[in-house]
Image: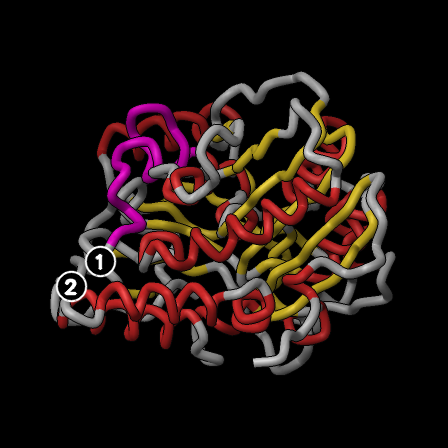
Amino acid sequence: MRAEPFRSIVVTPPADDPGEPRLIELIRAEIDASGPITFARFIERALYEPGLGYYATSAERMTRAGDFVTAPELHPIFGQTVARQIDEMRQRLGSPADFTVREYGAGRRTLGKALPAGMPYEPVEFDSARPRTSFPGVVLANEFLDALPVHRVVGRSAGLRELRVGWSDGRFVEVEADLSDDRLATWFESRHIRVADGNVADVNLQMLDWLQQVGHDLARGYALILDYGKPAELLYGPERPTSTLRAFRGQHVSSNVLGGVGHQDLTADVDLDALADGAVAAGFDVLGRVTQAQFLLNAGLDELYAAARAQADNDWDRALNLRAAVRRLLDSSGLGAYAVVILGKGVDAEPPLSGLVKRAV
């Protein structure tokens, strides 16, 4: 799920666009050389291939004029609210001189611009080298985990099989094969989950790798994760026969994940239970999980809204945009339903952070 489209400006994307020719040829050459590739590898190249992948070719993807709108781009009040929570985290850590906010998938750095002046900020993209220095602070990930490449598996009576990407009749196609990684089976077996015969599911192994990386890098502090996802029982049950992987383009959603290569976003719901388990395995404590609407209200959105409303009262357009943005941020069927997960390392769980405690309004 992305923010609800701005239908007045969107244009329906072409259904027959195969994608960026040079990127298609590179992926096809890899398949020709080594056989069908995993969906994770296909997604990695489709989204992040230097100079050709979806995220490597434009910074406008997540704006109102782009393919989807994220909460930070909707209105500055979102970033201001997140910044309040981060500042509280800094104070809870004792305001160390080397406190740092490291944001993964920072895009246009919109959240970084909302931080208090002078607060060290390190944006890290998927394909960029991350700083290696151990630091106290906050790791911030807003709609980052959903964009990590995922594997796809299909349930069979004899056990799980992996869906890979091959090439046939001039296009990319799904190919069923053996599992490429033992962790694909462990993902389900360790939690006693059975994928029904014929059902397709996503497995985000890179999320587990990322958690281990962050757990290694963060000496003391918090991980603030904002994303859309569901608990395992809603992702893999019989009522979910297909995976959640889908494409976004021109403010439209599509199930054609093998088309438009390099021209569309590919994203899948986060398994929130796997996120929690992976966090604990990486040395974190799970401090809490709330909806994004609850988090924003808990962290002081109402106060920021009142102040912004007072400043905008003499400007009809600003007031209207502010009100519309807040409604969308709190919408329980859209952005407000996103999950906010806060992890801690070397910090006290009590008293709870403001974002996890319901405030009196």
Residue 304 appears at what percent x and percent y? 43, 63
Do the residues under discs 1 and 2 have CB atoms within 8 angstroms?
yes
What amino acid is labelled 2 in the image?
Val
Residue 146 image point, x, y percent? 52, 52
Q: Is residue 107 magenta?
A: no
In the foreground, 356 or 279 = 356
Q: Quadrant of the C terminus?
A: bottom right
Q: Main secondary structure of the magenta part?
A: loop
Labelled disc at residue 185: none
- Earlier in the chain: of badge 1 and badge 2, it is 2
Q: Is residue 148 visible?
A: yes
Residue occupying the point 72% across, 74% down = 233
Side (left or right) of 38 relative to 4: right
Residue 18 or residue 57, whichever sits in front = 57
Residue 242 x, y percent position in the rendering: 54, 70
Per the image, label 1 sits on a secondary structure element best described as loop
Please state the extent of the stretch shown in magenta in the rendering. 45-63
Depth order, front residue of 297/217: 297
Q: Residue at x 59, y 46 (%)?
A: 86
Question: Quick check: 329 above or below 187?
Answer: below
- Visible residue check, residue 39: no
Q: Which residue is mark 2?
A: 10
| Quarter occupied by residue 232 | bottom right
Q: Which residue is mark 1?
A: 250
Q: Residues within 10 Å of mark 2 (few under 14, many from 20)?
A: some
